[in-house]
Every structure is written in structure tokens, then in C-alpha cells.
Image: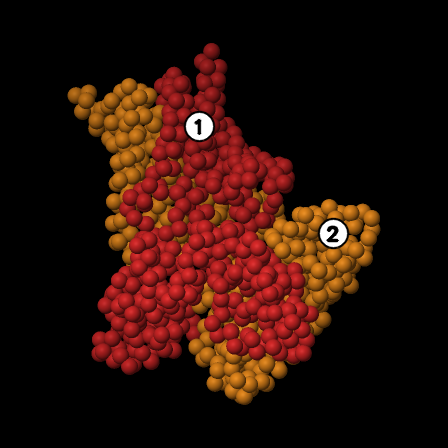
Chain colours: A orange, B red
Amino acid sequence: MELQWTKIFLPEIKELIETKDFKGLRDFLRERHPADIVDILRELDPTERVMGFRLLDKRKISEVFALVEPMEQEELLKRFTEQHAKEILVQMQPDDRTQLFDELPAHVVEKLLKLLPPAERKEANELLNYPHNSSGRIMTPEYVDLQMGMTVAEALEHIRKTGPNRETIYICYIVDETKKLRGVASLKNIILASPDQFIKDIMNENVFYVHTTDDQEKAVQVVQKYDILAVPVVDNEDRLVGIVTVDDVLDVVQEEVTEDFQRMAGIHTTEEEYFRVGFSKRIINRVSWLVILVIAATISQTILKSYSGVLSSVIALAYFIPMLTGTGGNTGSQSSTLIIRALATGEIKSKEWWKILLCEFKVGVSLGLIMGIIAFIIAALSLGKITVAAIVSVSLCIVVSVGNIVGLAIPLFFRFIKLDPAFVSAPLIATLLDATGLVIYFEIARRTLSKSAS
Amino acid sequence: MELQWTKIFLPEIKELIETKDFKGLRDFLRERHPADIVDILRELDPTERVMGFRLLDKRKISEVFALVEPMEQEELLKRFTEQHAKEILVQMQPDDRTQLFDELPAHVVEKLLKLLPPAERKEANELLNYPHNSSGRIMTPEYVDLQMGMTVAEALEHIRKTGPNRETIYICYIVDETKKLRGVASLKNIILASPDQFIKDIMNENVFYVHTTDDQEKAVQVVQKYDILAVPVVDNEDRLVGIVTVDDVLDVVQEEVTEDFQRMAGIHTTEEEYFRVGFSKRIINRVSWLVILVIAATISQTILKSYSGVLSSVIALAYFIPMLTGTGGNTGSQSSTLIIRALATGEIKSKEWWKILLCEFKVGVSLGLIMGIIAFIIAALSLGKITVAAIVSVSLCIVVSVGNIVGLAIPLFFRFIKLDPAFVSAPLIATLLDATGLVIYFEIARRTLSKSAS
């Protein structure tokens, strides 16, 4: 089947609903993947949606529910009966459940936790106790554990017995009597070994793990670096308590990318989805940076004020202010973006800074010369004044070269003092460069004009 | 083991090299994960690095080589003997080999292809024939295929026999005599079934697949949406020809994110790594947008020129140009970033545009009012002129409201006309807003000042 095939079936489903053919609908949904059912349900109105849920079989209902957008989950929980909600929650994967609780208001979570049987409630509470964005918070305790003394045949039997409820059976972890993590064996290793071999002889003792309190980003890095399907999570005493699987890693990557984009645009980052952010929070997330930048822009005002003499004698100088500050900022955000991404993906190391600076210095000067020539032509044509055109041209050349270096030096400096370079926002660089650019421009203008006047 | 433990071992390794303890070094490297060996080799100088490679065993050497940065791969190939290079290439996974050839200059690829035995050469040529960024280009033909008539026991036997050379054995594909894809069975399903069941009875017929010519982005979407470990790739006649696995998907995601970041900053996107981009290409990638933006900025010049009367009568108006244009651009890039990411992750659909516009209209006006008040205070304090402060304040309020809406309308429009919203670069929005902001500002100034003069 191809992606987005659900669109083709939508009229058919709508008809099944309108003719109240519940048996036909149930049969249709039974064959479908949970992710597709979510797509289908999204197209229905709220009452139809709740009805659609009722038609799903028990096992599938919690899978589908886990995939629904958080805001919609809350809405659905309100419409389900208590018994129905309970069934779904009990069936859900522990990590999906934590994610759901993370998004719901505290009083709703409290009510839902009471619905859970004691064992699940304890588990949910434990997971919710790990810090936000920690590996413990996104892990699932449903992994396959093996003993060192087991033979391959015994291990396979154990996997067959416990496997159906596990998040993955492809990576098995070997623990000792104290639950300490001792090794790892992939199902591939186990399947390819002979049945009477011992697990301790085929396991790999060099297991890469993370701690429950480690940032989730670390679990992501381990999975990406070692191309593994899951990373084990251990507590302070090195006991295995859960795993983070590759599908969760993909979700975290998307989340972190969104955060990086928002930071770059000067938005206070938020993990909530677009429509879920409340009105006042939406304002607060954005206004802080805007205010900082407006206050930072008073530097530009002061600079312009101090050059008001030059400015009023040649008013044409003002025409080029937006172009100069804009181009400086654009160059700076180009170079900072290049460097931030290259640092994030590990393509370059911060210790290669001299190599980067040298390389970008040459690039900046070349860009500056090209832009300077273009600016000269534009200014000369539009004004007919060679002096002003020359001032604009030389200034732009310098502004571009400086902007380029500043744009990459600030993220490198952030990395150097162990801060995430992604915190450097493009608007901040642009505002800093505005002030720098204006000083360069008006200082050149003042000197040139006073010389040509004398 | 924890991430980055390699740093601790570095002095030990350096000592093994200095004392020429090759046996010790070989033993140390044998136990290590290929990704860690790459980290270690990176710290060594080029001659030591080639020596390190010689100490690896045959199977591991190609795994390590596949993980080395492309520029370094080229460098290493030059230093290896022809026999050594041949051994590595033959052992490499087909998809890693395609990736290597993609990065090397054409004449080097031609030479290396000649080193391969006929079967591998044919395979490599076929993979290189698929378009750039297509699913065929990143797939590997090393999957496990099963027949419908096999029993579970026979299937397991087949997996044991062919498994060692396969990229993954966790997802098996069922094909008919004509190689047409008929179903999929996870190793989990197979392991949990009873040995005498038929594969055709436990397989899932609803297989999600992509075509060889589909963009790699589509393979990524299928893997992400359905949380699967691999997606099968079929040719025009629906015959199974390869698979794309989840680890490749993670790499593609990183690549695409880098592209989106670069586009947003107005850089012509490139798939090459930071240091690999040549000097002239480095300039070309960046200069095109800068030139477009400088030319677009002539609109601002024309506007300012046409208001030169107002400007020269109240020179203080010029002081606030950088703040006004900057804040308009910042607001626009905030809203465009929010919308582009929300569209990319599927949190919002473009058909909800009226809901988004309404919501952001209110946000924009609120932000505008807040910024307007702050700007009034700043301008009044620094100038002592209430009229100019009022002009600045009202203009900023309008500029922020307009900037906010423009920033989100453009990406929504792009999506509407089926273009990728990620093509909307923040600098372009900022430059458009510069011109808009200046007209608003000077028009308000002209009207207010002519009124107060009369």
C-alpha cells in the first residue's frame, strides 16, 4: 500500500457511517494500521469519532489512542465512559501512557491514575517521577531480560513466552540476580547461534547504556551513533529499569529540531503542539525576545543620533540604512546557520575553529567584494552621486565581511563555553550587526565627507 | 559503557602506538564498536590512521570505513594499496557503497568500480542509476525474502542460512515466483507462531512500500508513520528490489533538517559536508540570495527617497529605521518559523488556515500593542519629542501586526500552491517587511507632521 491511500477510502467510510453499516465499518477498520485509523478518524466529526473508537477491538484501541494528537486525546477522554477510558489506559504501552499524562492537566492525570490497577499505577507514578526530558521519562520498562546461565534454546522459549507484551524482542538484555545489566544479545545473534550454546558466551559485554536522569538527547545520540534499535536505561546502582526504542528516538529528534528552529527565530521554546499553546503563553513565548531586541536596537538609535550632523548634511545616506543593516544581518545568519548545523551534526568540531575562521574569513571578504560592487552600481544609478555610492559600497563590503565572522564566532564561542550553539538566535546576531554596520557606515561617511568638504 | 568513553582511552591508545605495541592495539580495537573506532582514528595523524586500519580484522574494516566522513574516505583510499581498497569495497554493505560513490569524484568511482567483482559491480551500477535522493538510491538489496508456501520452521531455517549477510532479519518479505511483493512478516510474528503454521497464514498482506523512484523523503515518512524497522522498495512492476532501514532514515532526517535550516537562512542547499564544499561553490551557495535581497532592498531605498522631504524636516525619524524594520522582520520570522515547523511535523493542516490566521491575528495585534508601548517610552525618553515618539509607537504596532500575518501567510500560501513551505526564507520575509514597514512609518509621519504643521 502506498502512503496516503486513506484519502481514497474516505468516501466509502463516510457512506458506511451514513448508512449505519457498523459491521462493514468494523471489518474495514480491523484490517487497517493504527496510524491509518488515526488519519481516518481525523476526518470525522467528534461524535462519529467516538463511535469509530467503540468499533475498534480492545488491543487496537489503545494503539490508535496513543497516536492521536494530545489535545484530541483529552477531548476523547471526556467523551468516553469511565470503564472505556480505564480499558484503554490499562492496555497502553507504559511510555505512551507517560507521554499522555505529560500533556494532560494535573487534575485530569490524578483522576486517570486512580482508574489504573495498583501495579500499573505504581509503574506510571515511577515513570512520571523522572525529570522532564530525561531518558527515564521516555523509557518503557517492557523489555526482554535473559539470564547468563540460559542456553539459546531456553532463551528462545523465554522470549516466546514473554515476547507478546514487550516493546521489542529484537534486543535482549542480560542481567544478573541483582538486576545489574551485564550484557546484550540481539535476536539475530540468538537465532543464528546453536540451541545448546550459553547466552553468556554469545552476549556482548560492551553494552552502551544511559542513566534514568540523563537527558533524552543522550539516548538519541547513543541510538544514532551505534545504529541500535534500543538503548537500555539503568538506575544509579546500574540496575536495568527500562529501554528507549528507535521509534521514540525519531520522535525526540523531531521535537528537538522544532526547538532549534524556534530558538533560531528568537522564540522561547515550547514542547506543546501548535494549537495547544494558550493565548497568553503564545504571547509570552514570543514577546520576551522581541522586547530584548527592541531595547538592543536603542544602540542603533544612539549611533544614528550621534551622526545626525553627517546624516542631515547628506540625507541620501539614510536611504541605504535598511539595505546595509539587512545584508549584514543576512550574511551573519547564513554563517551562523551553517556553523550551528555543522556543530550539531558533528561534521565539524569546535577545536577546528582556526580552520573554520580562516576559511570563512576568505569567504566573507569575497562575498563582501561582490556585494560591494553590486551596491556601488545600484547606488550610483539611483542617486547619480559617486561619493555616496562609494561610501555605501565600501561600507557594505566591510559589513558583509564582519557580519560573516561575527555570525560564526558567536556559536563557536557558545560551544567553547559549553553552551548549546543553538541558543544563538539569528535575530540577536542581526541586531548586534545592525549597530556594528551603522558605525562602520557613518564613520566612513563622516571621514569621506569631511575630507571632500575640506 | 557510556557515550564518549573513548576520550578516556585516548592516552592509552597513543601509548600503544608510540611503543609500537601492535598486538596490544589490535586486541584493544577488536573489542570496540566501529563507531568508537572511528572516534579513536579521528584523533590520530594520517599515517597512524592508515596503520590503525591495517590492524582491524577484515569484517570490521569495511564497517569502520563506511562510518568515516566522506572527505576522509577519499583520503584513505589514496593511501591504501589497491588490494586493500578492493577488499574493503567488496565487504561493504551495498547502500554504504552507493553513499561512498555518491560523494567521490566521477573518475575515482570509475576506477573503484573496476576493482569490484562482476556481481558487485553490476549491483553498484544499478543502485547508482536511480535518481539522486530517490528511495532506490539509498536502499540495500540485502533483505530476507520468504515464500508463501514455507512453514514457520522452514522460514526460520531459511533465515538462519541467509541471515548473516542481511541488513536486517527482523522484517521478512514474502514474494511470489515473479518476485512480486505479497506480504510482510516480522521475526516477532514468526518466532511467536507455531513451527508448522504456514507463512502465508501469519503474514500481513497490507504491506506499505515505496517505489524506487519515489523521493527518499517518502521512505522516511512511511517508516515514521508506521513505526516500522524497514520499508520495502519495489520497481515499476511491483517486484521487490530492496529495503530502506530505520538507521538510514535517521540519517536522511538529519540531512533534510540541515537543508531546511539552510533554506531558512537563505543559503542554496547543499548535501555536502561543511569542509567538503569547495571555495567557489561556498560563495555561489550564498551569494545568490544575498544579491536577490540587496536588489529587493532597492525598494526600501526608493521609498525612503520619496519621503526625503519628511525625513529631512525631522531627521530624528531616521534614528528609528533599524528598530522598526528589525522588529517587523523578527516578528515575521517568528511566525513563519512556527508555521513552517507545525506544517512540517503535521501538527497543523493547511486547510485549517482560517483558524491559524484568526489565532495569529489576535496574537499579532497583542504583540504590536505591547511593542508599541515600549517603543513609545524609549523614543520619548531618548528624544523628548512626543510627536515623533507617537509616530514610532503607532507605526511599530502596525508593523508588528502586519509582519506577524505576512510571516505566516507566505508559508501557508506556499503549501496551498503545493510548494514546500521550507523554501520561504526568513531573510526574504524580512526584506519584504522592511519595505512595508517603511511605507507605514513614513506615511504616518507625513500625515501627522503635515497636520501638526498646519
Q: Residues within 10 Å of mark 2 (few under 14, many from 20)?
A: some
Q: Where is residue B75 in the image (x, y as percent from the top left)?
A: 28, 61
Instruction: Write down the chain letter for disc 1.
Output: B
Q: Is residue B367 visible?
A: no
Identity of the residue furthest to the top in this view: B454
- Name the amino acid type tagged 1: Ala
Write down the residue under mark 2: A49
Identity of the residue furthest to the left in this view: A454
The residue positioned 29% from the left and 39% from the top of the image is A367
Q: Distance between the residues labelled 1 and 2?
A: 47 Å
Q: Is residue A299 above or below residue A5?
A: above
Q: Residues within 10 Å of mark 1 (few under 14, many from 20)?
A: many
Judge from the rendering whether residue A121 lies leftward or rightward of residue B133; answer left or right. right
Q: Residue B87 carries which label?
A: none
Write down the residue under mark 1: B435
CB contact under 8 Å: marks 1 and 2:
no
Q: Position of residue B115 (x, y in %)?
A: 33, 64
Q: Quadrant of residue A372?
A: top left
Instruction: Write down the chain letter for disc 2.
Output: A
Q: Is residue B446 visible?
A: yes
The residue positioned 58% from the left and 49% from the top of the image is B346
SS for tag 2? helix
SS for tag 1? helix
User: A212 or B164, which lies in front?
Assistant: B164
Q: Position of residue A33 (x, y in %)?
A: 66, 59
The residue positioned 51% from the left and 73% from the top of the image is B163
The residue positioned 55% from the left and 50% from the top of the image is B345
- Name the amino acid type tagged 2: Arg
Judge from the rendering whether residue A72 lies leftward or rightward of residue B34; answer left or right. right
Identity of the residue furthest to the right in this view: A20
Marks 1/2 same chain: no
